[in-house]
Image (cartoon, grey):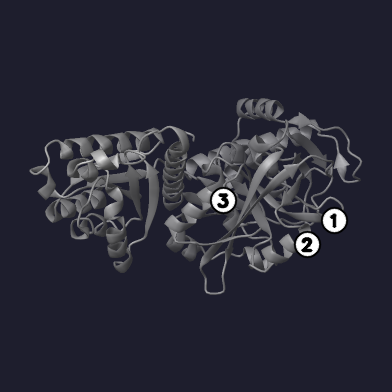
Amino acid sequence: MSENYAKAKIGVFGIGLAAYWSQFDGLKERLEGYQQDVEAKIGEMGAEVVSAGLVDDAPGAKETGDLFARENVDLIVCYVGTYSTSSQVLPAVQRRKAPVLVLNLQPVPALDYLDTDTAEWLANCCACCVPEISNAFARSRIQFNVVSGLLHPAEGNAQKYYERGWAEIEDWVRAASVMREMNYSRIGFLGHTYPGMLDMYSDFTMMHAQLGAHIEVLEMDDLHMRVNGATEQEIKAKIEEIQATFQIAEQGHDKISMPVTDEAMQWSAQVAVGLDRLVADFDLNGLTYYYRGLDGNENEELGAGLIVGNSLLTARGIPASGEGDLKTCVAMMMMDRLGAGGSYTEFYAMDFNDDFILMGHDGPGHVKISDEKPLLRGLGLFHGKRGYGLSVEFNVKLGPITILGMTQTADGTLKLLTAEGESIAGPTMQIGNTNSRLKFGLDPAAFMDNWAEEGPTHHVALGVGSQKNRIRKLARLMELELVTVG
């Protein structure tokens, strides 16, 4: 994860019963040592740990709740060291009302039953009160999740419980980081949505309400001013960056394909400099954009020059979605922060010979998930849009992929859709667009039927790797509906 991304604030408290400490010497210190191990590992995952120590009575739980509220933690981790009554646990999570992760991590794989005394059992009986506190959380309408497994590495069959448990915890920590990123994000909306695309119209207020994100409405004038202010030195440096990032395509066989001219390169670089300034001046974490323009006017010329600069922004972790698709910009940001990329993508065609779906878009793309150095291709026109200029062409890396879409339901709530599949080798179109051959768990016809029945938008964020489990956790933390297709 980039150091520029938000770190989740994780509030950690351990639990135990104060009555035990005078009865069993060394038990409290032993459990505190275990908790320190937990906090150290969570810190190594890139989170900021806010420790409340070991909580063993109701007053201490209330103090812990106040601490977590003051620190505005994103996720509360309850490490269950030994038995504790639920009445001295619940207050610790009621003040902040953040999601809770209950860690049911046993220190040893199994007890030596014939040689285990009460003190040793109590040091390993974390499972004892997990149902009790889960009941208290559920009845108090507090979102909670449980991870069971081993606290420390083990040998043989037991090792898988250590690996699986800590992998789950790391996924929760990463999901909490993405949630914090979304809660504090600033997304620019430049221009307007592509006229007539009813699926993409977004309710800015609901974005604020359900994601915590700020939507900054921008005028084309905001960008014009910054593009016009680009210096020759800045433009030259941007051209060098473009040439280092992209291969320059020759004349293609598509009748709208054309060479990359010096004039087109110069203009794309100048617009990219202006975009950099726009992002910096408005402190943006993402950008969605579209402007139709008219008869070659300045807005048309500017709108047609955005693909290269916005592809560079996307590669830097500032996702940029075309056609004014704000919801897909959010999905792209989620995928990027999960470390998967997140390229602006739509469904192109179904291949019934080899059972895959061709997917891509006319830009921008997340060039860091390309299978090779992406191509820069000149286009004599942008199909369905005004203007002409440079576009980006590449295939996503071969191997596991995940798509993530965000839509809005009839009652106004945001909804996520995801599917996992594989990027496979084979020819793709050479038309100045990103496009990849993607095979999902269902055949193309069945997949399209199931996906469309969920009322999606026609764009998705395409990322690499298997991200389903982390997306599920993110949706759970953010209380967003999630449908997995396939």
Q: Which residue is mark 2?
A: 445
Residue found at the very far left of the displayed protein: 22
**Dot 1 amino acid type:** Phe
Q: CA distance from mark 1 to mark 3?
A: 26 Å
The picture quadrant where one finds residue 134 is: bottom left
Residue 123 in sight here: yes
Looking at the picture, does residue 403 appear above or below residue 161? below
Looking at the picture, does residue 149 appear above or below residue 142? above
Q: Which residue is mark 1?
A: 352
**Dot 3 amino acid type:** Lys
Looking at the picture, does residue 321 appear above or below residue 248? below
**Dot 2 amino acid type:** Ala
Secondary structure of the residue carrying tag 3 is helix
Point out the tag, 2 or 1, that comes first from the N-terminus.
1
Q: Position of residue 373 (x, y in %)?
A: 72, 30
Q: Position of residue 471 (x, y in %)?
A: 53, 51
Classify 10 Å Cα crowding around label 1: few (below 14), some (14-19), many (20 and above).
few
Secondary structure of the residue carrying tag 2 is helix
- Near-viewer residue (71 or 10): 10
- Near-viewer residue (271 or 71): 71
User: Is residue 249 shown left or right of residue 292?
Assistant: right
Q: CA distance from mark 2 to mark 1?
A: 8 Å
Q: CA distance from mark 3 to mark 2?
A: 22 Å
Point out the tag, 1 or 3, that comes first from the N-terminus.
1
Screen quadrant of the C terminus: bottom right
- Near-viewer residue (41 or 72): 41
User: Is residue 319 shown left or right of residue 253?
Assistant: left
Point out the tag, 3 or 2, that comes first from the N-terminus.
2
Residue occupying the point 22% across, 55% down: 89
In the rendered structure, find residue 468 and report the number of the disc placed on it.
3
- Could you tell me how many numbered marks the image carries? 3
Labels 2 & 1 near each other (Cβ < 8 A): yes
